[in-house]
């Protein structure tokens, strides 16, 4: 197995399943982790699944991914809409990035309808709940295999 895919989650995603189930569903972040882990195994990928409420820690993990990962699946939470620091780190990482959102950000408030992460993402999956992480890993498997064929 090659380097892992970093699956990074931003602020408040630790609250999943505990509040606002009508927006974010009933699964906890641990449930999402287990689903992602299982799908990755089926695809022959390994994942490093993390969550942080801290913008700087997410930037540090993206910098780390440059050396240690072969791709990044990122739900940066609200930082998607605000963080040029995360955008800069993703640009510097030079890795395939797939952006995930549980909710359909385009059906929500106007301030959620722009994402800095989208500027570097190969693709964006939103509105499909935790399944979006599985779809992102499936797409990532294709991207990293295509990369190896050169
Ligand atoms: O839909 C998504 O995945 C989001 O990235 C989730 C973020 C939100 O700020 C983005 O606009 C879209 C919020 C993270 C979850 O926040 C919770 C708050 C209360 C209860 C459960 C989750």
Image (cartoon, rainbow, N blue to C red):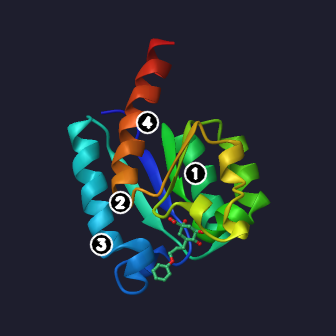
Assess whether mark 1 and mark 2 are in contact (beta carbons under 8 angstroms): no
Mark-to-mark CA distance, 4 and 1: 18 Å
Mark with earlier residue (4, 1): 1
Callout 1: SS: helix
User: Which x, y percent locates residue 116?
Assistant: 72, 54
Question: Looking at the image, is mark 4 or mark 1 nearer the viewer?
Answer: 4
Q: Residues within 10 Å of mark 4 (few under 14, many from 20)?
A: many
Say if 7 sits above or below 11 in the image. Answer: above
Residue at 61 percent across and 59 percent down: it is: 106
- In front: label 3 or label 4: 3
Write down the quadrant of residue 76 in the picture. Answer: bottom right
What residue sits right under mark 4 in the picture? 140
Q: Is residue 95 above or below residue 78?
A: above
Residue labelled with disc 3: 27
Tag in front: 1 or 3: 3
The residue labelled by disc 2 is 130
User: How many other residues sit within 10 Å of disc 3, few (<14), some (14-19) or many (≥20)?
Assistant: some
Quick one: label 4 or label 2, which is nearer the N terminus? 2
């Amino acid at each position: 197995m090659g380097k892992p895919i970093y699956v990074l989650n931003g602020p408040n995603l630790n609250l999943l399943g505990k509040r606002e189930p009508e927006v974010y569903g009933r699964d906890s972040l641990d449930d999402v982790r287990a689903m992602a882990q299982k799908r990755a195994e089926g695809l022959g990928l390994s994942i490093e699944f993390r969550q942080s409420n801290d913008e700087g820690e997410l930037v540090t993990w993206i910098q780390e991914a440059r050396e240690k990962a072969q791709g990044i699946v990122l739900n940066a939470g609200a930082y998607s809409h605000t963080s040029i620091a995360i955008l800069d780190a993703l640009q510097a990482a030079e890795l395939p990035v797939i952006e995930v959102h549980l909710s359909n950000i385009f059906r929500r408030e106007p301030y959620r309808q722009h994402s800095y992460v989208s500027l570097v993402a190969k693709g964006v999956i939103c509105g499909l709940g935790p399944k979006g992480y599985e779809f992102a890993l499936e797409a990532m498997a294709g991207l990293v295999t295509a990369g190896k064929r050169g």
